[in-house]
Image (spheres, helix red, strand yellow):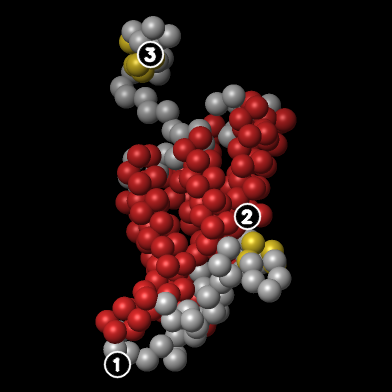
Amino acid sequence: MSAVREAVVLPLLFLTVFWLAGVRTGADVLLVPPPLVTLLLAVLLLGTLHTGGVCAFERLLGPHRSPLANLSGGLLLIAIGAASAQVFNLLLPESGLLFFLFSAFFAILLLTTLAAAGDRGRLLRALFVMIGSVFAFKYVVLSALYDPNGGLLTRALTAMLEGVSLGTLRYAPPGPATGYVGFMALVLFFAGLVMLPGRVEVRGSSIEVRGARGEVRVARIEE
């Protein structure tokens, strides 16, 4: 990974995610800080990204790097953690029973994924499905259920859930523009995850190096 991408592009990208994911629209435009539980979920996500090979910490921090390079890598990890916390803040309801249920859902899934430690491609797809599904549920399904104007989707969902009381599941739908800003934040977040330095797989005592013209050379690795 180039120094410009590590020191400039990726930190700015994740900081942009941090600001966008915290925006809440309505009567006023607010920037909501992440609650404590989202910081814990961000730590779990960082561990998952490392064990899954999406972000190899050893390529950002270590004695083999200069002090300035280690500082750059450390700041990038902080930016990833801050952006992750705000992404969870974007996905979690603000309070109440739904906040607890969503938080427990993310914690269980992240712990399960952390223990499984799949490869980079599978982990990125799993995160995409998990975060995308929760985003759609919160900003489409819940917003329709609790829409005071009662649109077509609201009436359809109410008919399917006839007899189920939503009084105990209090939820205040976000402003109409919040979902659009949040969707942009998620697109940038996943773009940043794809650009992170992954783990280099070394098999046996050799590694395959693809040349500029597509040919494959085998370089010996000394033990």
Q: Eyeballing the image, is 6 above or below 15? A: above
Q: Position of residue 175 (x, y in %)?
A: 58, 70
N-term-proximal mark, 2 vs 1? 2
Rendered position, 210 above or below 170:
above
Observer-nearest of 8 and 182: 182
Look at 35% across and 46% down and name the residue there.
125
Image quarter where the N terminus lies is top right
List the residue tagged with mark 3: 210
Distance between the alpha carbons at the discs numbered 2 and 3: 38 Å
Image coords of residue 214 (percent x, y): 35, 10
User: Which amino acid is tagged 3?
Assistant: Arg
Label 2 sits on residue: 20
Specify whether 150 is left or right of 178. left
Q: Is residue 71 above or below residue 163?
A: above
Question: Circle 2: is it few (<14), some (14-19), or many (20+) Cα within 10 Å?
Answer: many
**Residue drawn at x 54%, y 32% as measured from the top left:** 59
